[in-house]
Amino acid sequence: MDITFQSLPGSDSESVVRFLTSEIWPFHSISAVDRETAQQWIAEGRFESEENRSFWIVADGKAVGLVRLMDLADSTPLFDLRIRSAHRGCGIGVRALLWLTRYLFEEFPEVRRIEGTTRHDNRAMRRVFLRCGYVKEAHYREAWPTTDGTFHDAVGYAILRGDWMAGTVTTPEWNDEPLM
Ligand SMILES: CC(C)(COP(=O)(O)OP(=O)(O)OC[C@H]1O[C@@H](n2cnc3c(N)ncnc32)[C@H](O)[C@@H]1OP(=O)(O)O)[C@@H](O)C(=O)NCCC(=O)NCCS
């Protein structure tokens, strides 16, 4: 499969609205995005602004997903990744995270680490993190509210520039409680 990443400017905002509203996003806080919400997000600059950039994931000529990079003025940017349901489970998530990781480290020399958070039960995204050299750094219990009033655990992953450059995966020291 031929995959490219195309900068969002140049796309009409209606394409972004259609993309967001035509799919269910089961692991996002808002799983069914309505037109008004999508338009508001665009107007707020969530996709394109000084600190945010977005890219279509184009597979064999078709826009099958969206990469959104956030907090680009920070040394630890964040990202969001959304792939159309018909194209999930085909390896696009892994290729997108490898691409955005390289893009952020190469384009922004001050970036030391890249972080991503997902819901505990988002098995696909957690596999994608591990496949791309990201390491679990945080587990937030009942930190992810949903619209039905339930709370899920959230998990945080990150990759360090040093690990990315060296091709290594280092893990935090978890047994570090001070002894009494
Ligand atoms: C999460 C998401 C980005 C993953 O991308 P993807 O293209 O579907 O994943 P890939 O095909 O690259 O698969 C990566 C791994 O996840 C596994 N996987 C894929 N779908 C899965 C599923 N539904 N359940 C469990 N594992 C799954 C694959 O088997 C693969 O594992 P492996 O390393 O053992 O081979 C994509 O499914 C998606 O957009 N989901 C909806 C939006 C979302 O949840 N975004 C994350 C927000 S942080």
Image: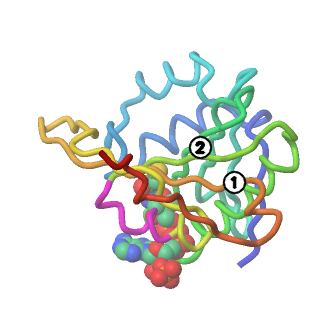
Task: Report whether the residue tagged 2 is closer than 8 Å to ligand 1.
Answer: yes
Q: Which range of residues does the magenta coloring cover?
A: 120-127
Left or right of 113 in this view: 6: right
Residue 121 lies in the magenta stretch: yes
Q: Which residue is depicted at the point 55% across and 64% down?
A: 171
Residue 79: x and y, percent? Answer: 59, 43
Tag 2 residue: 79
Q: Which residue is depicted at the point 59% across and 26% down?
A: 46
Q: Which residue is depicted at the point 23% across and 36% down?
A: 145
Residue 74: x and y, percent? Answer: 70, 29
Counting other residues with Cα less than 10 Å from the Cα at mark 1, is it few (<14), some (14-19), or many (20 or more)? Answer: many
- The image shows residue 139, relative to residue 77, as above or below, that is below
Tell which of 28 and 72 is nearer to you: 72
Q: What element does badge 2 sit on?
A: strand
Q: What element does badge 1 sit on?
A: strand
Tag 1 residue: 160
Q: Which residue is depicted at the point 61% across and 69% down?
A: 94
Tell which of 173 and 83 is nearer to you: 173
Sequence-first disc among 1 and 2: 2
Left or right of 148 in this view: 169: right
- Going by the numbered disc 2, the residue's amino acid type is Phe
Residue 84 seen: no
Residue 78 seen: yes
